[in-house]
Amino acid sequence: MERENSIEAHGLVREFKKGPRAVDGIDLRVEPGEIYGFLGPNGAGKSTTVHMLTTLLPPTAGTATVAGFDVVKEGPKVRKAIGAALQEAALDPFLTGREHLRLQTTMHGITGEERRRRSDELLTRVGLTQAADRKIKGYSGGMKRRLDLALALVHRPRILFLDEPTTGLDVQSRTALWVEVGRLAKEEGVTVFLTTQYLEEADVLADRVGIIDHGTIVAEGTPETLKSEISSSTVEAVPADPAQRLAVASVLERFGEQTTGYGPGSVAVQLSSPNGNLTEIVRALDADGVVLAQLQIHEPTLDDVFLAKTGRHLEGSGDDEEQGQELEAEPAQV
Amino acid sequence: MNVALLQTAALGHRAVVRTARQPANVVFPLVFPMLLLAVNSGGLQSATRLPGFPTDSFLAFALAVPFVQGALLATINANVEFARDIQTGFLNRLALTPVRGIVLLLGQLGGLMTIAVIQAVFYLAVGYAFGVRLASGVGGAFMLLVLEIVIALGFAALGSWAALRTGSTEAVQGLFPVFFVFLFLSSMNMPRNLIQADWFRWVATVNPVSYLVEAVRSLVIEGWNWEALALGFAAAGALSVIGFALSAHALYRRLERT
Amino acid sequence: MKDTLAVARGVSWRVLHMFFTNPAFLLPSLAFPLFFFTAFVGGLSRISQVPGFDFPTGYTAFQFVFVLLQSAAFAGVFTGFGIARDFESGFMRRLMLAAPNRSGILLGYLLSALVRWLTVASVVTVVALLAQMNVGGNGVDLIGLYTLALLLNLAGALWAAGVAMRLRTQQAAPVMQMPVFLLLFFAPVYVPLALLKGWIHGVASVNPITPLLEAGRGFISGEPELALAAFAIGFGLALGFGVWAVRGLRSAEAAG
């Protein structure tokens, strides 16, 4: 029974003809009822992985089971057990929200009174009752995403795949979606596989995070574990007089290694000790006659984890190609 | 089985609704063929004075053309939308449901055939309003609608093949001039036996579109010409079978789902 | 004047470079007139045997004139499509910012329309001659024929430019194309005016394209008729749409 809500992959590979190996040997296991965040830059292989796990793409090698069913040999059974909101909202601009639900329920074999009831229930749940009879082309981005989620839930799936569900949304819409996803997992026991390129989303929402880069998982664990394993805090100081920058640097370097990527005119040092003593740092700066305009402590982030594992920052490190090209490297062949 | 029928109906309904909600996709296939009919029937009326011309009304003679042209226009438009479904990921959304691939295709084709029939009724009504009476009577009108369904299926299936094969709206739109050429290099404006240029007559003879036009035309101006009808149904049927086989294969390749 | 010409040269070079190096533009421009010529001559030549169809040089020449004028008009209209595309992409804004004299932009598009059409006309003429078209007219007659086509090309380009400059979107394509299509096809396309009956005769009689078509056919058969009226209409259309296009340019400038 425990397998019914889980996702497992062993050595999953997807290679495109005349294209890159988009997924290059992924092993993962998502526990029932867990929210698993799959974090990585553009072109890392997130969506390709999702497409394989949701049976839209056959793997080139490796195996995967979703809800206890093999994704290659038992595709239809997998599809019955999962819901998916993929990266494109994929809605028809000429249909209304309600018509989308009608179509989706029919595709899932839900008919008659049950179809109407389920549609109304989902529209209420995602807050689209008022807009239900408006055509999609009049919907905002947030509304489209909410409808997308509702469509993924029509058949009460045990496992939900969300491929970058909040990309392009405003803060309010994003937060609302997080609340709903969290509720699905905690209250209804739905297993959620969520891909994202937003650190905050993975941090806030995910029970566990897998960080993917160039088709392989480079780190996996809870957000807290990953951050604590990789690094300690970073101290950032901005001198009141820019001429004192060198002096600040020479003091701070006694406590750790200088790092970059912080504000202009600042000096940042990653502390050698996880329990770096801020008081000592302040005393040392004071003893050397340095006057500070600003002093901050930055706790490690998942970006620091990514940086440690790959040598570059997560944000802005994606390939220039859009995600779609990762999947379109192999055009349909006769 | 019941579920499959409901799914097919739902997909077909969507194809019809989507077309109906885009005025350009409704008006153009209705108006443009009528415009051409008006131009051609007015401009070529004198052709009826040629010895051996089968009717004294060029309007009646040319009324067959909109049925083929309209089916072509409607199915091109709808298949552009089908290609858009692939581009936007909507096809993936449907692929993630338990619906079988063949149902996806049948639903799309069913919707297009429905649109073609609605158009055909419009063309019949316009022809009637301008004095054209079917030599084959009311029965002929029904036979014409059946023939129109098969013609539309042929074009629709070929258009679906292009959409599934390429996933590109531009590629599907690019089919229009190709079909247009086939239509013009046919017996649409002159009975085949009266075409003077040998090469053109040969092209029109090997062109399946000629038989589609001639079959419809026979119901309008001749009555029950079983040979013309048989050839028309055979041509439309062949296009449908080939188109359906191609599009089913393209769907199989496109979906790639396990 | 020097600035205007410099701008015109630059604009026309760009459009023509795109036209000649891009098969998606070049091939349909060549293919469609040839296709119409082939389909009409091949499929309808029997029409010349209708009693009263007296055209001395045969149906091929009869249709050649229509196809020549049609290709001229549509070469102009396609230029309008390009202008609309440039507006949508933002390239027109770049041109307007850079050009010291913006009339040069319009002139550049017109020059490109002309060169596009001359290319198509050359190919169509060669094909028609290879199809053993009879030419009854002399050199002066033929200059008259091609001048009429040139005027129609200018008129088509100016009409479409005016629409494009006002609407500034590719969705204006049907607005540019449909009136030209209707004007061309509500003329004596398949048979001379005298053989048209009923409503189509009435419409064709007042259609400004009809005198151009009849005059053109007169030129190619060596029996010129309605030449003065045709040239007056041709110049009138070009002038009238010239004003339309310039006002369109001003409207585009005002819109920013």
Image: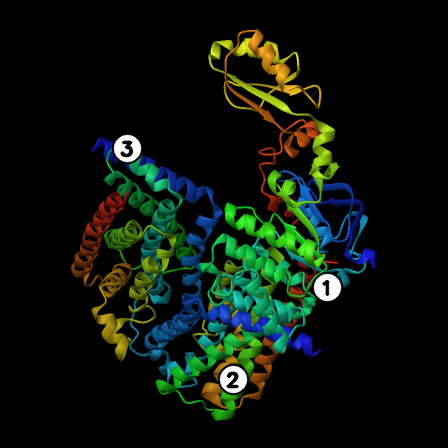
Question: Of A53 and A37, which appears nearest the observer?
Answer: A37
Q: Name the residue located 62 percent from the left edge and 17 percent from the top edge.
A: A279
- Foreground: disc 3 or disc 1: 1
What is the crowding at mark 2: few (fewer than 14 residues within 10 Å), some, or many (at least 20)? many
The correct choice, above or below, for B187 with respect to A320 in the image is below
Question: Mark 2 — on which chain does it sit?
Answer: B
Residue B144 tag number: 2
Measured as percent of width and height from the top left, residue A293 is found at 48, 18
Q: Name the residue located 48 percent from the left edge and 82 percent from the top edge.
A: B217
Kindly identify which residue carries mark 1: A80
The kind of secondary structure element at disc 2 is helix
The kind of secondary structure element at disc 1 is helix
Measured as percent of width and height from the top left, residue B137 is found at 47, 93
Spatial CA distance of label 3 from label 2 is 61 Å
Spatial CA distance of label 3 from label 1 is 67 Å
The correct choice, above or below, for A185 with respect to C218 in the image is above
Measured as percent of width and height from the top left, residue A212 is found at 70, 38
Left or right of residue C213, residue A229 in this image: right
- Pick the quarter of the image with the N terminus of chain C: top left
- The amino acid type of the residue labelled 2 equals Leu
Residue C6 tag number: 3
Question: Mark 3 — on which chain does it sit?
Answer: C
Question: Mark 1 — on which chain does it sit?
Answer: A
